[in-house]
Image (cartoon, rainbow, N blue to C red):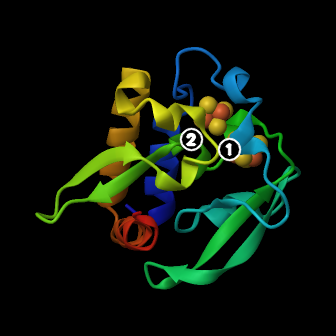
Amino acid sequence: MSAIHAVLAARALLDALTPLKTDCGRLCAGACCQGDEQTGMLLFPEEETLYENCAFARVHPAHFALGGAQAKLLVCDGHCNRANRPLACRLFPLFLAFKPDGGTRLRMDARARSVCPLTDYGLSALDPAFRQAARAAYDLLLEDDACAAYLRALHDAFSL
Ligand code: SF4
Ligand code: SF4
């Protein structure tokens, strides 16, 4: 499976699920979609190919590498067609942590703490279906070498 196939399969698992069964954006006025030209969502390996002619967002190079390749950010207008939202938006506010024994576990993304009110309540506050789909999505990504290297690098760079 190539990176883009793994990314598309992971995205599909999270097509219809969100962190809560209700619209969590009503808690925070959609805080995670209120970025600006200086911020954006990190794209997974090869995911930038899906946004070459995108009406609602632009791909910007980041000033750092992840998994041996230059990282890329999707900077959006704050609204999108949900079917086209990037994988990072679908997984938010979750993060994949690597354990010393090589295993992995889901946890809240420390980078989300200043934005997302859900991070105060822990994983158990999230819809179990969302958590299970995110775990399955990460497992699919870990089967692809480029995506696995990206996730490991993300852990090393942003594990706070
Ligand atoms: S910031 Fe958190 S609570 Fe708000 S819309 Fe995003 S995921 Fe939901
Ligand atoms: S791409 Fe969509 S879901 Fe992601 S931050 Fe932008 S508006 Fe929000």
- 103, 119: nearer the viewer: 119
Q: Position of residue 97 (x, y in %)?
A: 31, 56
Q: Position of residue 89 (x, y in %)?
A: 61, 45
Give the image quadrant in which the ligand numbered 1 is located: top right
Asked whether the beta carbons under mark 2 and mark 1 sit within 8 Å of each other, the answer is yes
What residue is shown at x 24% (from left), y 54% (from top)? Answer: 104
Residue, far top: 22
Three-letter code, disc 1: Arg
Picture quadrant of residue 79:
top right
What residue is shown at x 76% (from left), y 67% (from top)? Answer: 59
- In the drawing, does residue 18 fall left or right of residue 133? right
Dot label at residue 90:
2
Determine whether 116 is above or below 144 in the image: above
Determine whether 145 is above or below 9 in the image: below
In terms of secondary structure, where does tag 2 sit? helix
- 67, 22: nearer the viewer: 22
Dot label at residue 15:
none
What residue is shown at x 15% (from left), y 66% (from top)? Answer: 100
Determine whether 37 is above or below 139 in the image: below
Three-letter code, disc 2: Arg
Q: Which residue is mark 1?
A: 85
Q: Position of residue 137 (x, y in %)?
A: 39, 44
Determine whether 30 is above or below 99 in the image: above
In terms of secondary structure, where does tag 1 sit? loop
